[in-house]
């Protein structure tokens, strides 16, 4: 007997139900590409169990059940993949909270500029700057330590800030 006289039951099932299954999956998933993938996987699953093909009484019920299971499998696999990607991203993130090498270099250059600027001002002005910005002392507390009034401390701080400011291009 020829193949045309006795068509393959899988071919008949595919021809009869693929368009319907793809449309149903497209509505369910909202994405034609994912729908096509799941439809293909559904028929591949059917090919893998040819014995089930011969016993099919309700092909659409079998196809929808199989497709739903494949959708669940894909969702689980996606969740595992996403968790893995999140873990990789966390490992790839250079120690959160620590400066990158570029940021460390910029900070070192800024500190060198500040140090050079503080060397150019009187010693009491530099000390007032460090006491205020590093130790967090108030103007009155700095004045007591240096033996000057709070107004002079403000002048020292202004002097240091001016010295630290970048030079304007001419």
Image (tube, rainbow, N blue to C red):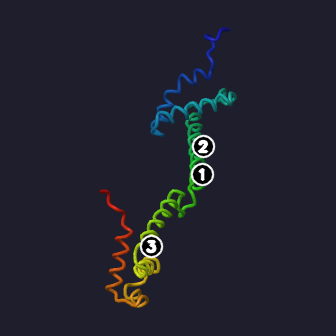
Quarter placement of the N terminus: top right
Tell me the quarter of the image containing the C terminus. Answer: bottom left
Classify mark 2: residues with Cα within 10 Å, few (<14), some (14-19) or many (20+). few
The residue indicated by pointer 2 is 73
Looking at the image, is mark 2 or mark 3 earlier in the sequence? 2
At 39% from the left and 84% from the top, the residue drawn is 138
For the residue pair 13 and 98, the one nearer the viewer reads as 98
Can you say whether 5 is above or below 41 in the image?
above
Disc 3 crowd rating (10 Å Cα; few below 14, some 14-19, many 20+) is some
Find residue 130 and report its horizontal and vertical position in percent.
45, 78
- Judged from the image, the secondary structure of the residue bearing numbered disc 2 is helix
Name the front one of labels 2 and 3: 3
Which residue carries the number 1 mark?
Answer: 88
Labelled disc at residue 119 = 3
SS of the residue at dot 1? Answer: helix
| Number of dots carrying numbers | 3
């Amino acid at each position: 007997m020829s193949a045309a006289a006795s068509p393959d039951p899988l071919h008949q099932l595919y021809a009869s139900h693929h368009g319907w299954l793809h449309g149903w999956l497209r509505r369910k998933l909202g994405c034609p590409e994912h729908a096509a993938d799941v439809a293909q996987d559904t028929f591949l699953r059917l090919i893998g169990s040819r014995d089930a093909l011969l016993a099919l009484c309700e092909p659409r019920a079998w196809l929808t059940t199989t497709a739903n299971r494949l959708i669940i499998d894909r969702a689980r696999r996606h969740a595992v993949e996403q968790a893995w990607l999140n873990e990789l991203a966390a490992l790839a993130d250079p120690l959160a909270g620590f400066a990158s090498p570029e940021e460390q270099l910029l900070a070192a250059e800024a500190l060198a500029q500040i140090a050079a600027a503080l060397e150019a001002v009187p010693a009491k002005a530099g000390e007032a700057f460090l006491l205020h910005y590093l130790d967090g002392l108030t103007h009155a507390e700095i004045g007591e330590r240096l033996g000057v009034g709070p107004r002079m401390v403000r002048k020292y701080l202004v002097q240091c800030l001016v010295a630290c400011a970048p030079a304007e291009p001419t």
